[in-house]
Image (spheres, grey):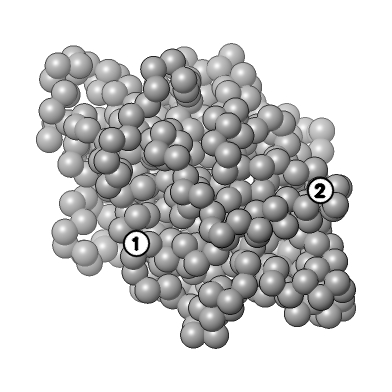
């Protein structure tokens, strides 16, 4: 283990569900054998309406975790925009209070959202002289503007000035795609792309566990061609085409096609009411499933769907999870789909206004005996460990370690799949 003391500040962390929590949880597992790691994370609440496991605490459970986890209180997620804004500001201040109580760290890694955790990192830089890394997973305030929550005006301009100040203060900024790179790089000193991905080792291990669903739900998946959406049922996703497809199948007695929506979100109730009005027996809404039990459920499905409305050229993490579970993927994304996904033969684009093409694609996929396994080189490409190793090389470079001194900590990518190699020159981050 290198003598690097690293602090992670995050708004999401297991056992909370969702891509953000799962991603930071796997990053912590990756870093724990490489540095002295401390994580400040909220008391779990999402997607529940109340916090669990008490209030502020040092989490001493899971003694084999390999790093220190400090829990601090955060107001549970709310549908009210002003409550959510206040919650993020209060949590950033709470993180600052906890960080100042800890011993000094060489570096602080901040994962957004929340936007305001970047402010906390800037304050820590000046008080504790700690360099910081800004890990951007949602581009604020641009995403709020795209979603119609902010319009051009003094508030937006003030947040943009704050955003650019945070970029300039960070020693390293990571973004998930090249489109964001273009927006961030003019304001940052050192900007790199660390794409989304999936923790394949954990995913493959967890896929062997019994699915965390009822017997009736398991039977539904076993008896039908299951088309699944996993994630937040909110404003960033447009599921209207999927309900139209379900109605078409229902009206034409094509009962084999069943649509499963797993998750919570601000639009869930409206979707449920729409399903009730249309009397769609082939649409089902299931409660969120913990990350460590999700893989086994996905393995029982056939097709993963997603229709992202905003965040151009962003690939939702659920697409990688679908592929890790060997599902075919039918997706609608703004901007361009990465070519390696299209070339995989597993990912198919659709236009969210073209119902006939979407129906035909599902029929073609259902006509096969079973989904084709995801190619090994695609699994290598989407391996989160591969991306984290690139991040670690940059962290050690910032700390002044030579490549030889960290060689023992790079290791080989172990995906629990043999003979996975990346064709030279085929893929680029």
- Residue with the mark numbered 2: 357
Question: Which mark is first along the chain, 2 or 1?
Answer: 1
Q: Quadrant of residue 304?
A: bottom right
Few, some or many residues within 10 Å of mark 1 (<14, 14–19, 20+): some
Identity of the residue drawn at 55% across and 17% down: 185
Q: Residue 272: give x, y in percent of width and height.
A: 76, 74
Q: Nearer the viewer, residue 252 or 240?
A: 252
Q: Are marks 1 and 2 in contact (CB under 8 Å)?
A: no
Residue 337's tag is none
Quarter-of-image position of residue 231: bottom right
In this rendering, position of residue 121 left or right of residue 87: left
Which residue does the image show at 45% across and 40% down from the upper left? 375
Residue 372 placement (x, y as % from top left): 51, 49
Q: Is residue 387 above or below residue 407?
A: below
Residue 61 falls in image quadrant: bottom left
The answer to whether one can see residue 171 in this image is: yes
Element on which disc 1 rests:
helix
Q: Which residue is mark 1?
A: 206
| Residue drawn 33% across the image and 38% down it | 385
Asked if 53 appears above or below 23 in the picture, the reply is below
Helix, strand, or loop for circle 2? helix
95, 329: nearer the viewer: 329
């Amino acid at each position: 283990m290198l003598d690097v003391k690293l602090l992670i500040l995050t708004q999401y962390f297991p056992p909370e569900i969702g891509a953000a929590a799962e991603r930071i949880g796997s990053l912590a597992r990756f870093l724990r054998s490489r540095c002295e790691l401390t994580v400040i994370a909220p008391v779990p609440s999402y997607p529940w309406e109340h916090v669990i496991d008490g209030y502020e605490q040092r989490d001493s459970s899971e003694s084999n975790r390999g790093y220190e986890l400090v829990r601090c209180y955060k107001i549970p997620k709310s549908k009210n925009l002003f409550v959510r804004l206040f919650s993020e500001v209060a949590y950033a201040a709470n993180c600052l209070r906890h960080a100042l109580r800890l011993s000094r760290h060489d570096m602080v890694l901040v994962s957004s959202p929340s936007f305001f955790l970047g402010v906390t990192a800037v304050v820590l830089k000046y008080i504790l002289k700690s360099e910081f890394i800004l890990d951007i997973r949602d581009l604020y305030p641009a995403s709020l503007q795209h979603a119609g929550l902010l319009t051009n005006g003094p508030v937006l301009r003030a947040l943009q000035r704050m955003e650019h100040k945070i970029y300039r203060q960070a020693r390293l900024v990571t973004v998930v795609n090249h489109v964001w790179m273009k927006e961030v790089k003019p304001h940052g000193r050192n900007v790199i792309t660390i794409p989304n991905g999936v923790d394949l080792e954990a995913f493959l291990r967890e896929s062997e566990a019994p699915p965390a669903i009822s017997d009736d739900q398991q039977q539904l998946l076993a008896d039908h061609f299951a088309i699944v959406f996993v994630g937040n049922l909110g404003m960033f996703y447009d599921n209207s085409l999927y309900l139209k497809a379900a109605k078409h199948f229902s009206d034409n007695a094509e009962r084999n096609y069943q649509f499963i929506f797993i998750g919570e979100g601000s639009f869930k109730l409206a979707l449920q009411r729409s399903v009730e009005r249309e009397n769609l027996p082939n649409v089902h809404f299931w409660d969120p499933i913990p990350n460590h039990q999700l893989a086994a459920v996905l393995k029982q499905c056939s097709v993963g769907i997603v229709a992202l409305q905003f965040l151009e050229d962003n690939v939702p993490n659920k697409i990688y999870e679908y592929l890790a579970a060997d599902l075919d993927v039918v997706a609608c994304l703004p901007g361009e789909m990465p070519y390696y996904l299209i070339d995989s033969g597993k990912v198919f684009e659709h236009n969210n206004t073209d119902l006939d093409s979407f129906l035909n694609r599902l029929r073609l996929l259902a006509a096969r005996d079973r989904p084709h396994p995801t190619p090994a080189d695609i699994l290598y490409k989407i391996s989160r460990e591969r991306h984290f190793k690139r991040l670690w090389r940059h962290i050690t470079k910032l700390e002044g370690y030579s490549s030889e001194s960290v060689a023992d900590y790079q290791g080989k990518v172990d995906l629990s799949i043999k003979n996975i190699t990346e064709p030279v020159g085929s893929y680029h981050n």
